[in-house]
Amino acid sequence: MFCPNLDQVTHVVAQGFDHILRGYFKDRIGQDYVERGDYHVLRAEDSQVINPSELASTVEPGMVIEMSIILRQKFAIGDNEKACPRCRYINSSRKLINGWIEWQVSH
């Protein structure tokens, strides 16, 4: 009888969850963050981060979880700082304010 150990199960669950997220975010805003693994899964009730290795033992049916992206400061110099994260359009006329640019997305 095959009985996987807990490490194998948690690894498979973490990989499966990541795979589902990658599929969901394909061609959507946030795809780059998910592909780089720049996200956290959190318990909605207390905002505690659920590590990928703890998904199988922490998440229960009916539990509400949230996802947040991890923004990393870029140290690049030049127009790449002013590129739209969605379409990559470089808007060199916009000014950075505390490292941020206000973007308006038209549909």
Image (tube, rainbow, N blue to C red):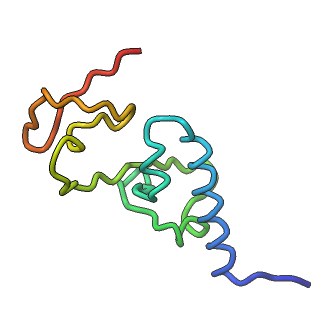
Which residue is more in the foreground, 54 or 63? Answer: 54
Residue 70: x and y in percent read 33, 54
Image point (43%, 42%), residue name: 30
From the top left corner, tell me how far across and down residue 3 is, in percent: 81, 82
Who's the residue at 46% across and 67% down the image?
A: 51
Q: Position of residue 18 (x, y in %)?
A: 57, 57
Q: Does residue 6 appear to the left or right of 72 in the view shown?
A: right
In the image, 55 versus 86, the foreground residue is: 86
Up-down: is 35 above or below 25? Answer: below
Residue 78 appears left or right of 46: left
86 or 16: nearer the viewer:
86
On screen, residue 78 above or below 4: above
Quadrant into which the C terminus falls: top left
Q: Position of residue 94 (x, y in %)?
A: 13, 28
From the viewer's side, name the closer residue of 17 and 99. Answer: 99
Quadrant for residue 29, please give it.
top left
Locate residue 8: give its quadrant: bottom right
Quadrant of the rendering where the N terminus is positioned: bottom right
- Counting the numbered discs, the total is 0
